Amino acid sequence: MTQGLDVSSLFMEMVKASATVDIVQKKLVYLYMVTYAGHKPDLALLAINTLRKDCADPNPMVRGLALRNMCNLRMPGITEYIQQPILSGLRDKASYVRRVAVLGCAKMHSLQPNTEIDPSVVNELYALLRDPDPVVMVNCLRALEEILRDEGGVVINKPIAHHLLNRLKDLDSWAQSEVLRLLLRYCPRSDDELFDILSLLDGFLSSAHAPVMAATLRLFLHLAAAHPAVQADALSRARGPLLAVCGSASRELRFAGLSHVQQVLRSQPAQYCSHYKRFFCSYSEPGYIRLRKMEILVELVNDENVVLILEELKSYCTDVSTDLAQAAIAAIGRIGRTYTEKCLDILTGLLALKQEHITSAVVQTFRDLVWFCPQSTGPVCKAVEGCDETPQDDEGKQALLWLLGAHGELISSAPYLLEGFIDGLKVEISSAVKMELLTSTLKLFLSRPAETQDMLGRLLHYCIEDEADMNVRDRAGLYYRLLQSGPDRTRQILLGPNSDPSMTVLTGRPEEPVSVWASSFNTLGSLCGTGAGPENLPAEDSAHQVHAAEEAELGFGPAEQNLNTEPEEPLSDAAAAELDLTAGPPISHEAFERLWLDLQVVHQQVLEVRRPPEPPETLQAAFLLVKIQTLAFSRADAALWKAYVYSRAGGTLLLAELLQGAPEEPESEGMLLVSIKQQPENQSAVRNFISVLKRVLQTLSSNTS
Amino acid sequence: MISQVFILSSKGDHLIYKDYRGEADKDAVSIFYEMVTALSGDQPPVVMSHKDLNFIHVRQGGLYWVASTKTDASPFTIIEFLNRLAALTKDYCGSLCEKSVRMNFALIYELLDEMVDYGYIQTTSTDILKNFIQTEAVTSKPFSLFDLSNVGLFGAETQQSKVAPSAAATRPIMSHRSEQGGKNEIFVDVVERISVVIGSNGVLMKADVEGEIRVKCYLPTCSEMRIGLNEEFSIGKSQLRGYGMAVRVDECSFHQAVKLDEFDTYRILKVCPSQGEQTLMQYQLSDELPCAPPFRLFPTVEKDYGNRLLIFLKLRCDLPPKSTALNVSVTVPVPKSSLSLSQELSSPDQTADLQLKNKAILWSIPRFPGGAQLSALFKVEVPGLSSASLLEVGPVSMSFELPKHTCTGLQIRFLRLSPTHPGLSQRWVRYVTHSDSYTIRI
C-alpha cells in the first residue's frame, strides 16, 4: 500500500478486521482506512461504529488512537459523527486523549472551512491553554492558530504571552521553538516589560538545540528592533551555538547553520573574522556545503587572515570537482578586489597548471578583476600573454576575447590569439562567442590597425557572407558600416569604459542593518538556492554589466531610460540638497550627445590651469576618484584638445566640456575652458563641480611639474 | 507544520509514506525524487520547492528522509526532526538501512503516528514513545564469521567474550523476548571528531575537535546515573585548574535532562538516561590541542626521468605507543593525466591503488601502532609531465579511527548507577576519535 499499489478493493475486509483487540492490528487497519476513506466514503461509514465504540474504551491509548484516526478520515459528512467524541475528548482525564482532541478541533474546522466558527469551542481551547500537560497547551495554540486563521490567528495578549513565557521551561524543544515563533506576534507595552522578557529568554539563546536557539535569536532580533545594541549583543551570544551547528555531524544541519551565518554576516562581518578557520572545507563534505563555506570565507577576509585564507582557497583550486575548483578561483578573484597583488600571484600561478577548466575560470576572474580594479590591468595583461592555453568553454572564451579587445594594446600577442579564434570560426557553435570576437577584433583594430586589418577583413567577410545566425550577421553588418564612417567615429561609439566607473579604489560592502534580513531568519527562504543573498551577485553581474555597457554604447541598451528616470528620482529627497558629486550609471555616448545638443550652456569659465600632460588613462582614473566620469578625450597631440565629462550632484546631471586652445578666446592660451550644461539647473552644484574639477587638475599638474 | 513525511530508498523506491494534512498529492514523492536526482553538483539540495510545496530532506543510512511543508517553517526544526526520526528508527530497529526499514514498516508507521499529529510534532522522547509502541522490531542479522568466533570453545570463557563486540550496540532497544534482553547494558561513548590542517612547512594551521558524550541505554528501568569527568576539566580559557595536564574545551553544552548541580565542583554529570541513544554533552575545542596531532607526514615529490613522477611519503604516528590507529587511509591527489601506478609499501597488509575517477592514490593501512613510522614510494606514470604538474600533487587528506583515544584528553573517571542493580547491569565506557578532516599540504 505504501509502495504505491492500489489495494482499496479490500476495504470491506478491513472494516471487519478493525473490530479486534490486538492494538498493532488496529493501528495498521486504521492506517489503511485513513488512506482509502476518501475513495470509499460509503464503506468507511461502516467503520465509524467501531471507532466510536473505541472512543469509549477504558484504555486511554485506544481512545486516543480511535479519536485521532476518526478525525483523520477525510471524507464529506464525517463531521457530524466526530463532533461529539471530540467534545468529550476535550474533557478526558488522560492528557493523551486531550492532545488528540484539541488537534481534532483543528481537523474538524479544516473539513468544513466555510462554516461559522463555533465560539464555544474557541473558548474551550483558550481555557485549555492552562492545561497542566504542556503538549495539550501547545496543541491548543496550534489549533487556535488554524481555526482563527482568517482573523489573524491566535490572539497573544499580555496574560497569554506571560503565561507562555513562564511555561517555556516545561516544554520540550519542539514546543519551545513553536511557542517562540508565535511570540513574534506579541509586542510588549513598555521597555521594562521588553527587557523582562528578554532576560527570561536569555538562557535559551545558548540552547544546545539548534531549533530553539534559532527561534530565540529570531525573537530577540524582532523584539529588540529598536535597540541595535541589544541585537548586536544577542548575535554575539548566539555565535558560539551557531558555530557549533556549523560543525555538527549532520550535513543538512551544517548547511542550515552556514546559511544563517551568512545572513548574520550581512550586518556583522567582523563578528566571525577570528573564527575563519571554522569555515575551512573538509574533503569529505559534499559540494554544496563547501561552496557555502567559500562564500563565507570571502566575507571574512581581513588584513590579518588574508594570507591564510588565500592559501586555503588555493588548495581548493585543484579539486577534482570542476565546479568547486572554479568556485574557489572565483572566490580568490573576489578577494582580489581588495588584495589585488596577492591574488594575482596565485591566479597567475594557476595558469601554469594548463588545465582547461582552471584556465577558463582564471581568465573569467581576470576579466572581472580588470573591470572592478583598473590598477590590476598591467599584471593581468602580462599573465594573459604568458598563458599559452586557451579556454575551451564559451564563458572562458568570451572573457579572453573581452580582455584582448579592451586591453589589446598591452598584450603583444593579442593579434595572434585573435587570429587563432578567427581561423577556428567555422567550428565555433556559440553565437555569443562570435559576437564577442567581432567586437574585440574591431576594438583591437582601432588600437593596432596594422596587425589586425587583414584578419578583421576576413572575419567580417565570413560573418556577413557565410554566417547563419542573424544576430552575428547583423552585428557584423553594423560594424562594417561603422567602419565606413571613419575610424574616429567608430572609436567614439565602440570604446566604452574599460572598468566599472561606480567602483572606487577600495571596495567594501556596507553593513546592512539587521532588520533587512531578520524577518527571514530561521525560515526556509534562506536555504533555497535563490535566497543566497546578494553576496554572489557582483561576480555574476560583472559579465552582464560589461555587455550592458557595450550594448548601451551601441544604443541598444536601457541606458537612455536610466538617464530619463535617474535625475527625477533623487529630486524627492533633494531637500537635503546634498551637493557631493556622485557616480551614477554610465551614460552612453549617444545619450550624452543628444543631451548636449538639447541643453543650453549654463556656465562657462576659464580654469586657471593647464591641461595635465598625463595620458588619458591617468586622467580618467583621477576623475573617477572624485566621481567624475569621463566620456571621451581627444588625442593628446590634437591642436584643439577636448574632453567630455559628466557627474551627478544634488539631484542634477552635470555635463561638461573641457577645451584647450579655443580659437575664439586667444587670451586664455593654454588654459582650459570649461562649459557646463545641466539638467535640471542648480547653481550651487555647478560651483561645487567646478571647484572639484579644478582641484583635480591642479593636483595632477603639480604632480608632474 | 509538516504536510507529509516519506522515506525513499536511494533508487527512489517508496518505503514509507505518511500524509498528515491531506494538502498535497501523493505525486509529491515522485516529484521530489525527480528534483533531487536532477540537481547539479553545486546546487544545495537540502531545501527544494515545487510550486508552493517545500521539500526538506536529510540523507541517512543511504535513504532519503523527506518532509514536505506548505508553510515557511523553521529549517532547523524540520531538519532536526528528520534526524531524530532517523535516530529513533535506528534505536527501534537496531540498524539503519533499506532492509531494516522495509522489514519494520509497521513499527515506523506507529512511530510516525505517535510523533506527529496533523503536521505538528508531539513528542520524540523515547521514554514517552515506548509506552505507545507495540510492534516488535524485526532484526536482520547478516551472517558473519565474527559471531562464530564469539562462541566459546566448549563453552569456555574466552578473552573475546569479555570485550563488548562491536555489534553489541546495534540492536533494537526494545526486546520483549528475554533471550537478548537479559543483558542490561549501558554504553557511554566519548566520540570526538578531529579536523586538522597542517601547512606545507609542517606547522599546525588549524586544529578543531568536536566531541560528544553519548549514552546508549538498554536498561528497562530508569535509574540515576552519575558520570564523573576528569577533575581538571575546564571550560573556556580563563579557568585553569591546578597544574599539569588540564583538559580544556572552549565551549560546552548539555542535554536538557542533565543535572549540573555537582558539575562545578566535582565535574559530575547526573542524568536519568532514557532508553535509546542520547547525546549528553557536546563540546568544542579549537586551535590548541593538548597533544601533538596524531599523524605527521614527510613527503618528497620529484620528477624522475621520462614521464614518471616519484612520490615518497614517510608517515609517522605520534600516538602513545599503546594506542593504535585503525583503518587509516591516505589520499594523495595526482596530476589529472596520470595513467598508472607502481608502488613499494613496507608491509603486505597495506594496499595502494590509483583511483582514476578521483585522480588520486589511495593508500590504506589497516593498523598503525603509535610511535611507528611507515613509508611508501609511489611511481606514477604521467604523460606530458611538466614542472607545473607537481603543483597538482596534494594536499594529502587522511581518514582514520583512533579507538581508546581522545584528543582533548577527556576521560570518564567513573560511571555509577543508583540504585545499583547487583550483577545485573553491564556498563561500558568507550572512547573513539574519528577524523572529520585531516589535511596535510605538500
Image (cartoon, helix red, strand yellow):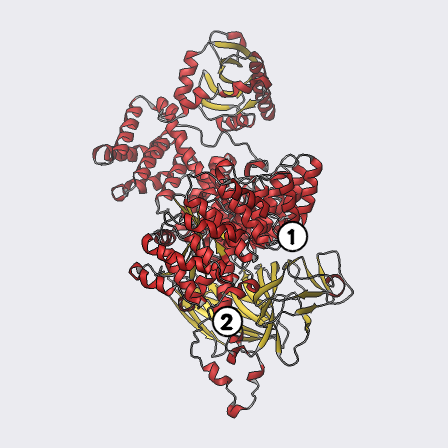
Name the amino acid, label 1: Lys
Name the amino acid, label 2: Pro
Is there any visible trace of residue B1 in the rendered image? no
To which chain does the residue with label 2 belong?
Answer: B
Residue B191 in picture, x, y percent from top left: 59, 66
Is there any visible trace of residue A100 in the rendered image? yes
- The N terminus of chain A: image quadrant: bottom left
Question: Considering depth in this image, is B127 or A617 the residue closer to the camera?
Answer: B127
Choose top left, top right, bottom left or bottom right for residue B254.
Answer: bottom right
Residue A669 in picture, x, y percent from top left: 53, 11
- The C terminus of chain A: image quadrant: top right
Residue B212 is left or right of residue A647, and the answer is right
Question: Considering depth in this image, is A576 or A645 the residue closer to the camera?
Answer: A576
Q: Is mark 2 on a helix, strand or loop?
A: loop
Residue B12 in picture, x, y percent from top left: 36, 59
- The total of numbered circles placed on residues is 2
* Disc 2/disc 1 C-alpha distance (Å): 31 Å
| Residue at the disc numbered 2 | B172
Q: Is residue B343 above or below residue B256?
A: below
| Residue at the disc numbered 1 | A169
Choose top left, top right, bottom left or bottom right for residue A690.
Answer: top right
Q: Which of marks 2 and 1 is in front?
A: 1
To which chain does the residue with label 1 belong?
Answer: A
Residue at 72% across / 56% down in the picture? B237
Neighbor class of circle 2 (other Cα within 10 Å; few <14, some 14-19, many 20+) is many
Residue at 52% across / 25% down in the picture? A583
Residue B164 in picture, x, y percent from top left: 56, 78
Question: Considering depth in this image, is B89 or A246 the residue closer to the camera?
Answer: B89
Q: In this view, does A426 lie above or below B214?
A: above
Check residue B137 in the rendering and tell me which mark sits there, or answer none.
none
Q: Is mark 1 on a helix, strand or loop?
A: helix
The single residue placed furthest to the right in the displayed view is B242
